[in-house]
Image (tube, rainbow, N blue to C red):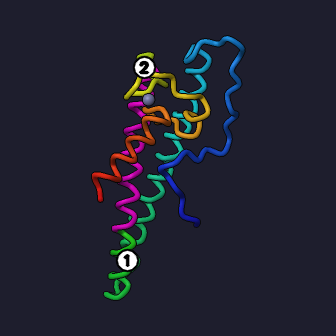
Amino acid sequence: MPAKENNTFALSDFTPYKEKKGEEFMGPEMKAHFKSILNNWKSELMEESERTKVHMQNDAENYADPNDRASQEEEFSLELRTRDRERKLIKKIEKTLELIENDDYGFCDACGIEISVRRLEARPTADQCIDCKTLAEIKERQVGS
Ligand SMILES: [Zn+2]
């Protein structure tokens, strides 16, 4: 099974949103659009997470040899990290769904402007506009080095 990248949005079946002329940002239709994207993404992640869990349970019973065990432990810690990432992402998606409910979705946390629909479709949990995000990443890199 190919490794799946979970921290970026990977839903296969979604139609890009077509804004109508003069449409209000995050009006009911737009909100419904992102709500369904986020909900679908969440179910995909939860399925994925369940598969990982079952896989780990099955594997645990199949190795008696110590050498197999060692490589299995490595695999386990990798899967645990994956599950951890999935759990965090699911939490983030749930928070984002709350934002939609509270009419707070789609605005930059840092400067308050509308985050573009295309950016939100690529990253439905984005909470900053591309400019603020870029700036934050530059700052992060400077602190890190
Ligand atoms: Zn911003």
Residue 142 spot, x, y in % from top left: 32, 52
Give the crowd class for mark 1: few <14, some 14-19, many >=20 residues within 10 Å.
some
- Quarter of the rendered structure image containing ligand 1: top left
Marks 2 and 1 close (CB-CB < 8 Å): no
Q: Is residue 50 left or right of residue 33?
A: left
What's the residue at 41%, 77% (across, down)? 62
Residue 141 spot, x, y in % from top left: 35, 53
Q: Mark 2 highlights which residue?
A: 104
Residue 130 spot, x, y in % from top left: 50, 36
Give the crowd class for mark 2: few <14, some 14-19, many >=20 residues within 10 Å.
some
Residue 53 spot, x, y in % from top left: 41, 58
Task: Specify the segment rendered in magenta.
Answer: 77-100
Q: Mark 1 highlights which residue?
A: 72
Q: Does the magenta stretch include residue 98?
A: yes
In front here: 134 or 42? Answer: 134
Q: What residue type is labelled 2?
A: Asp
Q: Point out the frontmost of discs 2 and 1.
A: 2
Q: In this view, does 123 lie to the left or right of 118?
A: left
> Helix or strand or loop: what does disc 1 sit on?
helix
Which badge, 2 or 1, is on the more N-terminal residue?
1
In front here: 105 or 80? Answer: 105
What's the residue at 54%, 58% (across, down)? 4
Q: Residue 9 carries which label?
A: none
